[in-house]
Image (spheres, rainbow, N blue to C red):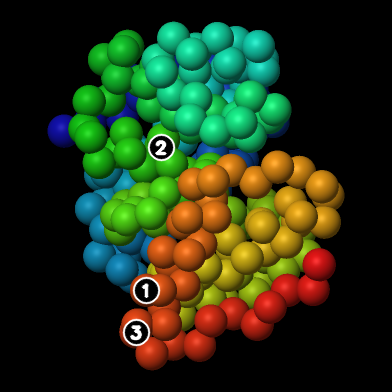
């Protein structure tokens, strides 16, 4: 289904050398999560390997491509074009014929902002990107623990930390991120689970 040598070669042409440990950490973590929660290993590997395909593009190029592909949906992307790297990466991969699988493209597109109704694959890639082994930030161990307990709880915990950081640093919050957090909160509560303790801003 996927030509992994071709994908990896394309990824390594675009991703800086110092970013590769993160990419391979996401692949490793995503496959571990897939083994626990039942994700398709080939789709998981493809999405994880290519999730940062557009990460190294300059902000002005991300904005230009975002406009060309019709991807800009929130003022936060205009202010912080780095938020576009997932959606631009997915669009480039499809345009270049490297990936055509809609599930994989969705996971790549939404791995930064999230979106309500995320699939299992979407959630695995979003979480793996946040908790892979090279990540070092306050609260990451709490998110890792939640992720291995329940996928949606892990995402909700991660989003709460992300939103707290964005508020603390005075940044605009992408509407999709807020919508995703509320969607996940409903899922966790309907499953009878306790939501994460409120983080202190």
In this view, the residue in front, 151 or 9, is 151
In this view, the residue in front, 117 or 47, is 117
Q: Nearer the viewer, mark 2 or mark 1?
A: 1
Q: Relative to 199, does residue 180 appear above or below in the rendering?
A: above
- In which quarter of the view is residue 149 placed? bottom left
In this view, the residue in front, 115 or 97, is 115
Marking on residue 108: 2
Is residue 29 visible in the rendered structure shown here?
no
Which residue does the numbered mark 3 point to in the structure image?
A: 191
Label 2: few (<14), some or many (≥20) within 10 Å?
many
Which mark is first along the chain, 3 or 2? 2
In contact (CB < 8 Å): disc 2 and disc 1: no
What residue is rendered at 73% in x and 61% in y?
164
Q: CA distance from mark 2 to mark 1?
A: 22 Å
What residue is rendered at 66% in x and 71% in y?
141
Left or right of 66 on screen, residue 191: left
Is residue 121 visible in the rendered structure shown here?
yes
Q: Relative to 43, does residue 200 appear above or below in the rendering?
A: below
Element at label 1: helix
Which residue does the numbered mark 1 point to in the structure image?
A: 187
Which mark is first along the chain, 1 or 2? 2
Percent position of residue 145, x then y: 57, 76
Element at label 2: helix
Left or right of 2 on screen, residue 176: right
What residue is rendered at 23% in x and 35% in y?
102
Percent position of residue 25, x then y: 54, 48
Q: CA distance from mark 2 to mark 3?
A: 27 Å
């Amino acid at each position: 289904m996927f030509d992994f040598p071709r994908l990896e070669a394309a990824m390594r042409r675009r991703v800086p050398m110092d970013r590769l440990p993160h990419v391979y950490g996401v692949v490793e973590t995503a496959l571990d999560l897939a083994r626990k929660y039942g994700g398709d290993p080939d789709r998981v590997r493809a999405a994880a390997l290519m999730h940062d395909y557009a990460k190294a593009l300059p902000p002005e190029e991300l904005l230009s491509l975002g406009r060309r592909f019709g991807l800009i949906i929130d003022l936060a992307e205009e202010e912080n074009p780095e938020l576009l790297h997932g959606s631009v990466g997915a669009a480039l991969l499809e345009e270049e014929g490297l990936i055509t699988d809609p599930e994989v493209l969705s996971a790549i597109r939404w791995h930064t902002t999230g979106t309500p109704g995320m699939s299992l694959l979407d959630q695995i890639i979003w979480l793996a990107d946040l908790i892979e082994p090279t990540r070092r930030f306050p609260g990451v161990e709490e998110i890792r623990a939640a992720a291995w307990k329940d996928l949606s709880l892990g995402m909700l915990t991660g989003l709460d930390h992300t939103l707290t950081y964005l508020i603390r640093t005075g940044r605009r919050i992408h509407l999709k991120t807020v919508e995703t957090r509320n969607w996940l909160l409903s899922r966790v509560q309907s499953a009878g689970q306790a939501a994460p303790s409120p983080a202190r801003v």
